[in-house]
Amino acid sequence: MNTQFSVSIHILTLLSTEQEPVSSQYIADSINSNATLVRKLCRYLKEGRYIQSSQGISGYSLSCAANEIKLGQLYQLVFSDSMHFAKIHKDTNQHCHVGKNISHALDDIYTEIDDTIINKLNTYTIQSVIDRF
């Protein structure tokens, strides 16, 4: 699993603690990363309607309250291109009884685990993260 989910939480937590819109460079400095990565993730967050930016105003701000941003929903946004929390290996030997059935068996298990992860994450919000500081 990559770090995009935790970095997205970092971005939303930072924005929720700021009064004014903040630049991608300011966010990158907090993450100790580069502004290009921040802008890429901010595109996802804008599409998910978690953040906003306005023409003529530099920077990003939250578009909803921190207690309305559920981590499970954020997880689904960040990993929308992924089928499961873990990848299932492909191109197995279809002449082997395990190779022929493993993908289907893992798909069922991983779907159940994905649902559990999302449900548990949805018990937390960005405000929950801030409350742990």
Image (spheres, rainbow, N blue to C red):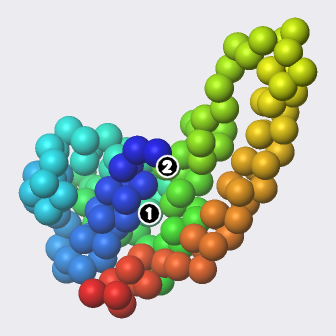
Task: Determine crowd level at label 2: few under 14, some 14-19, many 20+ residues with C-alpha closer than 10 A.
Answer: some
Between the residue at mark 1 and the residue at mark 2, the CA separation in whole angstroms equals 12 Å
Q: First in sequence: mark 1 or mark 2?
A: 1
Residue under circle 2?
Answer: 78
User: In the figure, is residue 116 to the left or right of 124?
Assistant: right
Disc 1, disc 2: CB below 8 Å? no
Q: Nearer the viewer, residue 54 or 67?
A: 67
Kindly identify the amino acid type of the residue bearing the numbered disc 1. Tyr
- In the displayed structure, 45 sits above or below 103; it is below
Task: Determine crowd level at label 1: few under 14, some 14-19, many 20+ residues with C-alpha closer than 10 A.
Answer: some
Determine the secondary structure under disc 2: helix
Can you tell which mark lies on residue 36?
none
Quarter of the image for the C terminus: give it. Answer: bottom left
Residue under circle 1?
Answer: 50
Q: Give the residue displayed 49% in from the left and 78% down from the top.
A: 125
Determine the secondary structure under disc 1: loop
Q: Measuring from the top left, give residue 90's x and y in whole percent.
A: 68, 20
Q: Nearer the viewer, residue 56 or 83?
A: 83
Q: Measuring from the top left, give residue 80's x and y in whole percent.
A: 58, 43
Q: Quadrant of residue 106?
A: top right
Q: Measuring from the top left, give residue 29's x and y in whole percent.
A: 9, 57
User: In the figure, is residue 128 to the left or right of 26?
Assistant: right
The extreme bottom residue here reads 131
